[in-house]
Image (cartoon, grey):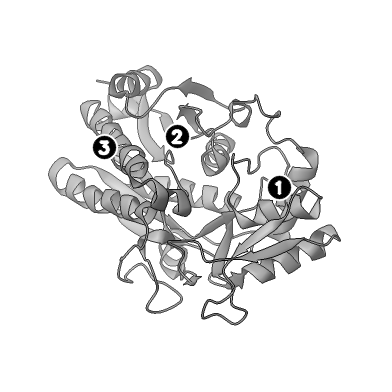
Amino acid sequence: MASDAEREAVLVTGGAGYIGSHAARALVGAGRRAVVVDNLSMGHREAVRWCDLVAADLHDEEAMRRTIRQYGVSAVMHFAALASVGLSVADPAAYYRENVEGTLSLLRAMRAEGVSRLVFSSTAAVFGEPIDTPITEDHPTRPINPYGETKLVIERALAHYERAYGLHSVTLRYFNAAGADPEGILGEDHRPEEHVLPIAIDAALGRGQLEVFGGDYPTPDGTCLRDYVHVTDLAQAHLLALARLESGAGSAVYNLGNGRPFSVRDVIRAVERVTGRTVPWSLGGRRPGDPAVLFASSARIRSDLGWSPAISSLEDIVDTAYRWRLAHPAGYGGEDSR
C-alpha cells in the first residue's frame, strides 16, 4: 500500500451528483487532486469537468480498492446515497441497501487500502421532529423516515470505526441544499425533481405546477419551515472538514445551515420576486416523513472551522438557481445525458 506522503487524491463518491459535483470542483479550485466515483444512476457525466470520473458502484468493493490504489487516495468525501424522504418511506429496502450497505462496502475498501479520513454527507433528517430550534448538534436524533434512519446508522457506525480501526471522520448534517454554482456551470438536475426550489422555478417558467405538501402544519403560514443553505457554501464546508482531518484533529459532527427558517410560501414569493413571474401552485396533503420545522444552529462549525455562508439571502440563492436553469433548460444535455 502507498504511504501517506504518496497519497494526494481525494475520492469523491457521488461526485457526478448535485452537491458532490460542486465539492469536486471546489477541491480542484483549491489546488487539490480529485477523482469522482459515481454509478451514474442519478449523476451526470457533464457535471464532472475538472477531474477523472470512474463509473463504478460502491457495492463493487474491488473497483473501489482499485481506484484508491490507482489514484493514490488519501481521503474520501462520501456523497453517494439515495436522498428522497418520500421514496424512502415507500421503499425503505432500497435505502438500507444503498445508504447503509453501500457505505459499509466503501468503508471496507478504505480499511483494506489504509485510508483513514472520511468526510461524510449526512442530513438534518437524523433529528426527526425537533424539540428545540434552532437545532444544535446535541439535539436528540430520532428520525421519522427511513432516509434519516439510514444516515444515522452510518453516523453511529463511524464512532465505532474510529475506536476500533482508527478511521477519523467529519460528519456534516445538511439542512436544505439549494442554489447553483454562481458561474452557471453546475446546477441541480434531479430526475425526477423533488426539491421545492427548482420545481418552483420551472413552474414560474411555465413548466408545470408546484404542489405544496401540506398547509396545516403548526407554522405561521401552515407550510413546512426549512433552512436553505447554498450548495457552494456546503462545498466549502467539506474543504474545511478535510483540512481538519489532515491537521490530525479527531472526528467531529457539524450542522450546516443558515440558521433562519423559510416556509414553502416564502420560497414561492422569493421565486416570484427574482423571476418576475407568477408561480402556479396547488395545495396537497402532507407528505409522509416530513417534519414541520427544520432549521439549524451552525455555531459549532463557525467556531471550530471558521465556516460562514457566503450566499445567505433566500433571493440570492434563488437567483443562482434561476440563472442556471435559464442557461440549461433541459438540464445537463437533455434526457440522454447520463
Q: Position of residue 78 (x, y in %)?
A: 40, 40
Specify the farthest residue to the front: 285
Residue placed under numbered mark 2 in the picture: 12
Question: Can you see residue 211?
Answer: yes
Q: Residue at x 38, y 36 (%)?
A: 76
Q: Residue at x 55, y 66 (%)?
A: 285
What residue type is disc 2 on?
Answer: Val
Tell me the quarter of the image containing the C terminus.
top right
Task: Bin the neighbour count of mark 2 within 10 Å (Cα to Cα): few under 14, some 14-19, many 20 and up.
Answer: many
Residue placed under numbered mark 3 in the picture: 104
Cα distance between the residues tagged 1 and 3: 35 Å
Cα distance between the residues tagged 3 and 2: 16 Å
**Marks 3 and 2, the one that precedes in the sequence:** 2
Q: Position of residue 251 (x, y in %)?
A: 29, 53
What residue type is disc 1 on?
Answer: Pro
Q: Secondary structure at mark 3?
A: helix
Near-viewer residue (167 or 262): 262
Q: Contact (CB < 8 A) between labels 1 and 3?
A: no
**Marks 1 and 3, the one that precedes in the sequence:** 3
Q: Residue at x 20, y 47 (%)?
A: 162
Q: Secondary structure at mark 2?
A: strand
Q: Is residue 333 above or below residue 220?
A: above
Residue placed under numbered mark 1 in the picture: 182
